[in-house]
Image: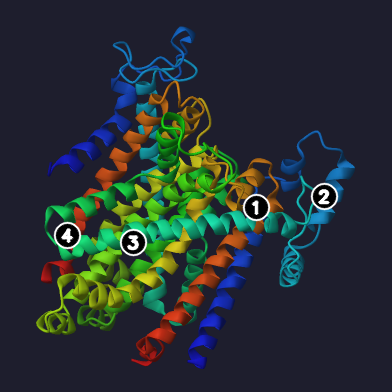
Amino acid sequence: MRCFPFVIAITWALLAVLGPFVLALEPDAIDLKKILFTPDMSSWLGYDDLGRPIWDRLVMGAQTSFIVAMWVTIISVLLGTFIGSVSAYFGGWLDLLVVRIIDVFLAVPGILLAIAFAGIMGPGIENVVIALSVVGWVGYARLSRAQILALKHREHVQAAVSLGTGPFTIIRRHLLPLISAPLIVEATFGIAGVVIAEAGLSFLGLGVQPPEASWGSMIRDGTAYMLIAPHMVIAPGIAMMLAVLSVNLLGDKLRDKFDVRLKQQ
Amino acid sequence: MLNYILSRFFSALIVIFGVSCLVFLLIHMVPGDPVELMLGESARPADREALRVALGLDQPVMTQLLHYLTNLVQFDLGESIHQRQPITQLLAERIPATVQLALVSLVVAILIAIPLGAIAAVKRGSHWDQLAMGFSLFGISIPNFWMGPLLILVFSLWLGWFPVSGKEGLSSIVLPALTLGTAMASILARMVRSTLLEVLGEDYIRTARAKGLSEVQVVWRHGLRNAMLPVITLIGLQLGTLLGGAVITETVFSWPGVGQLTIEAIKKRDYPVVQACVLLISLSYVVVNVFTDIVYAAIDPRIRLGDGE
């Protein structure tokens, strides 16, 4: 039970990265005789409304969500940390401006802004990544800003300043390593959020386009056939829930491991 | 207190201004020509030009922004391209449904979260605690666009208790509110647990126990009451998640609210309506938060005086 999150998360990653190459998948193969077939020996998760094997599509969906989650998290962390730490370190009008911008972004519900962006830019995996990154950087900016503000008056930073080290070197070498732990924890929870958001956009038809598979679009396709083929909705939902749950549990573990404040209590 | 209210209003105004600009910029994010996207390739050049002029897209960006903000102050949100109706009228038709859904979901969330969080805190470390927190983790990990269809499958299709979708009669709100409410309850329950744990460690709780109050009275009258203050603020902050979630939940259940209007407008590329919906939802979130802050400050003087420390 204790290694459950690791096992699930690693399975998700392996399926996403290697699955399409190692397993002989036919996610787009249409078999008209098997439309809406419930799970059987030939395809253990059954077939969808076009007669495509659900397991194969599930693996492709794992790939979609993994790719989007990784890209969005990497872009958001880099962008957010850069903006937050530079703003906190230099302070002044720059910081005031950044704080206002963060406030504005926080005032718009994240998923709503992502929906609007994705809707306006048009569907496609790149636009999903852009839309979710536009929303995603804010949390990391706020976190790194708060952390750097608390750290920038430390002695070792003063020492670096008096040695003539440039501000960007100080941020990179003397401050960022100190705030990496909370950022990693936040990013782990962020991955779970992105998986849900990507599936949500695809559910609304704003994510990847057919015949590409996404857990969200699989759920949407399934809702029309729920009474006769509930497996179409249940299978992708469970896959997504397992991925999100495992990443959230990993985040909990990391937080317990890293967070000094929790340890002291 | 007056100073606090004024400063809170002032910063809210700046945020509202920023949100308006952000929403204004949305239409300029369209790859290519928004008019062509809205009308389709087959539209006549004259129609295109007319729409371009109607949307003000023929003018410089700064003029457009100024025009947009001036209209906004006068509650003029423009006209829907597809329905040829003032957007304010479209919104007015949809707002009651969303408010209803949000309020009922909020009640559902509170009814689930407070007992759950309280049991978890009082029985800390026990199986009850694990069960409650397990439920909460599941709730966070199950997105509403999956939860909704599952509830429809079980309670509408199999058991036939509630309608599948739409808004007719009281029973039609149960499933959407449950979908939206559980998601929020999962987050709230964790907050109730942690704040209550903090409060239960206070001296006055020991005093209450020492004077012989029953455990229920200690938790209810002295514990939960004091733990409620931060929870109320957090409910205000969670409202953003609730309203964002409403967009998807309304689509799942064909609930005729602002969220569904947003998605319909996106599908029809009716960008002015999309802008207005995003603006409305964000503004209501900002207003509710200012209101919660002020109420909170009125109840707890440490908030309005604490800034100087």
Residues tagged 3 and 1 counted as in contact (Cβ below 8 A)? no
State how far apart marks 3 and 2 are (Cα): 46 Å
Residue A48 screen position, x and y as percent: 44, 20
Label 3 chain ID: B
State how far apart marks 1 and 4 are (Cα): 42 Å
Q: Is residue B87 left or right of residue B205?
A: right
Q: Identify the residue shown where x is 26% and y is 61%.
A: B117
Q: Secondary structure at mark 3?
A: helix
- The reply to whether residue A202 is in sight is yes
Q: Is residue A58 left or right of residue A9?
A: right
Can you tell which mark lies on residue A256?
Answer: 4
Label 2 chain ID: B
Label count reads 4
Q: On the same chain: label 3 and label 1?
A: yes
Mark 1: few, some, or many residues within 10 Å (few <14, many ≥20)? many
Q: Quadrant of residue A19?
A: top left
Q: On the same chain: label 4 and label 2?
A: no
Q: Secondary structure at mark 1?
A: helix
Q: Which residue is mark 3?
A: B188
Can you tell which mark lies on residue B51?
Answer: 2
Label 4 chain ID: A
